Image (cartoon, rainbow, N blue to C red):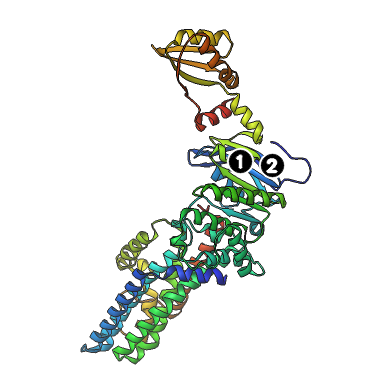
Amino acid sequence: MSTQAGPPPMVQATGVSKWFGDLVAVSDVSFAIGAGVTALLGPNGAGKSTLLRMMCGLAKPSNGSLTVLGKDPRADVAVLGRIGMAPQQESLLDYLSGREFVELAAQLHHVDHPVEAARQAIQTVELNPDDPRKLSTYSKGMRQRIKLAQAIVHDPLVIALDEPLTGLDPRQRREMIQLFHRLGSEGKCVIVSSHVLDEVERFGSRVLVIAQGRLAAEGDFREIRNLMDDRPLRISIRTNQPRALAIALLDRGAISGCRLEADNLVVVDTSDAVAFRRAVAPAARDQDASLLELRPLDDDLESVFRYLVMR
Amino acid sequence: MNPHIYRVVIRSQISTGRLLALAGLSGVAILLAFVARAADDPVEVATQSMGTFGTNIFAPFIALALGSAALGNLVEDRTLVYVWLRPVPRYSVATAAFAAVLTVVGPIVVAVMTVAAAITGVDDLLVATAVATALAVFAYSGLFLALGLRFKRSLLIGLGYIAIWELLMSRLGDWFARLSVRSYPMSILSDATDVSIRLADRSTLASYIVPLAIGFAGLIYTSWRLTRTEID
């Protein structure tokens, strides 16, 4: 478990596990999160949503403890007033307009001026508070933004957002990421889940990597990125000189092993992607080999997460 | 009771299908009243038909359609989170939903059945029908509100309950009848007109108290369930 120096964590998980029958969704996860933006990164089905649901009191840990602002969100209804959440599911109260939906959230949170607060929250997410249309007519991007508006309308201290950028166009994504950072810089604890590595990179924040229900890595995004870059890679090289090129790469120490697959195909293993990238072109030139194709065989996000879990 | 949740549940309950069902069943009640009025023994026929239709069919089916949907729809379409994730006591959510169901179901069913009783021309039946129907609505609404939160296919389960338990099993004997909701409000009608209705042998006190107890039990269970359930 990591702890942060300074003020007490706003969200703290200690040995949290969650299982549904035989399925273990979250396994012995511990972390502490303070103010600022924290990304929850992991492939689909990794347990991110379950963790967020437990943080908001929507689900109870099967084991361990999870506190928000020092309170158990399932036992203490009052602490829910300090939490804002945008769940992953698209479904909304479709018979309400966007303004009514956000106003309802403000009213249930006992906000002093719910109408004004709702207008402001809707404008913050770049929607029109005077739009009379029902939520059933909203596009996916609009639904995402109105979910965000209802999550921030009561000025919560802890904001949990489950895949909030899905369905947004690039400009809206940029705006939303700026909003997350602004909220984080105001001292709020903003937790954003995502399964998209590049998306999380743009958060430029602290990252918790969740894979197979476990906390696979945590820290600054750059550290996590380096870890990912350092993992062993398997690369398929299509060339007219597979044997000669493989020997040249071995001589240069750029690969740790190789296997000839066909007349023009060799599969190589390397634990240093950067060194491999630097060596492959000169080696091909020296051997008078044509590089027809270079293809990483395990560069998908799943394999990256698998590596982080297994390391 | 939370007024904001109350308003939202009321709005969620109004749908074309439900309004059509209400209108259709209301029409049947009025039709039965005219048939009873024209009968040779209007007191006997009116008491039987008001009891059979009002408390056995009209009240339970409408209470099921709206009661099971009040929170059940929020569970099924995964929007309960927008109500649950607020600093609102759970009993307040349950009470608001219960009140919303009663607000929609109560006046319509009670008013229609009272008008039907008036059409029959049997004076003794007027107040008794209003009271019996109101108690039936209260009991069934609480029961089906809880059912909607507890089970995913609550409408189907509720239909099974009404058909198998209330309409079929309750006929098997006095103890089965005691465990059916309908026998209590029907006893009020039977008392009022001195017409004997099958299964309507409950004491006067029980006829009033048991439906109220069932309604409140459903409300209490719903509140408890809201504190325990995991929200999707």
For the point 71% across and 45% down, the residue is: A34
Q: Quadrant of the N terminus of chain A?
A: top right
Give the letter of the chain under mark 1. A
Question: Residue B46, percent across and down?
Answer: 28, 84
Residue identified by numbered label 1: A202
Give the letter of the chain under mark 2. A
Quarter-of-image position of residue A277: top right
* A306 to the left or right of B40: right
Quarter-of-image position of residue A253: top right
For the point 79% across and 43% down, the residue is: A6
Q: Nearer the viewer, mark 2 or mark 1?
A: 1
Which amino acid is tagged 2? Ala
Residue A149 appearing in the image: yes
* A189 to the left or right of A305: right
Q: Quadrant of the C terminus of chain A?
A: top right
Residue A61 appearing in the image: no
Query: In the rendered image of this protein, does residue B227 appear above or below residue A34?
Result: below
Question: Residue A234, percent across and down?
Answer: 50, 20
* Viewer-side residue, B48 vs B62: B62
Distance from the alpha carbon under mark 2 to that under mark 1: 22 Å
For the point 65% across and 40% down, the residue is: A204
Which amino acid is tagged 1? Arg
Residue identified by numbered label 2: A32
* Viewer-side residue, A30 vs A106: A106
